Image: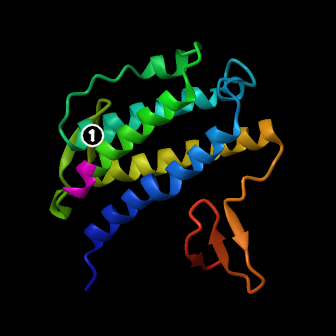
Amino acid sequence: MVDLAQAFVDQSRRFLLAEYLPKIERCVHALSDEDVWWRPNDASNSVGNLLLHLSGNVRQWIVSGVGGAPDARRRQQEFDARTPMATTALLARLRETLEDADRVLAELDGDRLLEPCRIQGLDVTVLEAVYHVVEHFSTHVGQIIYVTKLRTGRDLSFYEMAEDGSVRRGWLGGPTVPG
């Protein structure tokens, strides 16, 4: 029988580091520094703000909430930042955060998934915390992709369609997946 707890954790790790991060990196490399900090209006976030926000969210929920590290997050500062930070520094921060989270998840015993924890004043289980982070991350990756397409006017070639209908992950040069 498949260990569902381990499969859940393994897939969560893959989504964060092997699916979402490469897409973000492709987007950021396609944008100018000005585009990374562009906002369509004051009610919207720039890609730069979203990168800061994703780093803060993952660190708070996984590294601190699940892993037990101190939580020093200042959430509002992620959205208030207007002074452009170098894209290399933004991506390095995000990668470091995801690698720290990956270490926590790699050591996570499946028996802990139903263990309670308190994050952002909410009582959640470890499973809910991991699920929240993956879902939340996915939402913001979609926003980053949209802004990148809006600002560059080009396809990012995340998927390549073969004549037989199969799909190749363009950001990985990886295996064909069902379409």
Determine the residue located farthest toward the top in the rendered image.
83
Disc 1 marks a residue whose amino acid type is Val
* Among the 4 quarters of the image, the one containing residue 81: top right
Q: Residue at x 42, y 32 (%)?
A: 93
- Quadrant where the image shows the N terminus: bottom left
- In the image, residue 60 sits, relative to residue 37, either above or below, namely below
- In the image, residue 91 sits, relative to residue 7, either above or below, namely above
Residue 2's spot in the image, x, y percent? 28, 81
Categorize mark 1 by other alpha carbons within 10 Å: few (<14), some (14-19), many (20+). many
Q: Is residue 164 left or right of residue 18?
A: right
Q: Secondary structure at mark 1?
A: helix
Q: Which residues, given as a range, are shown in magenta?
A: 103-107
Q: Which residue is mark 1?
A: 63
- In the image, residue 17 sits, relative to residue 110, either above or below, namely above
- Quadrant where the image shows the C terminus: bottom right
Front residue (pair 50, 28): 28
Q: Is residue 58 left or right of residue 44?
A: left
Q: Is residue 106 magenta?
A: yes
Q: Is residue 27 magenta?
A: no
Q: Residue at x 57, y 45 (%)?
A: 24
Determine the residue located farthest toward the right in the rendered image.
153
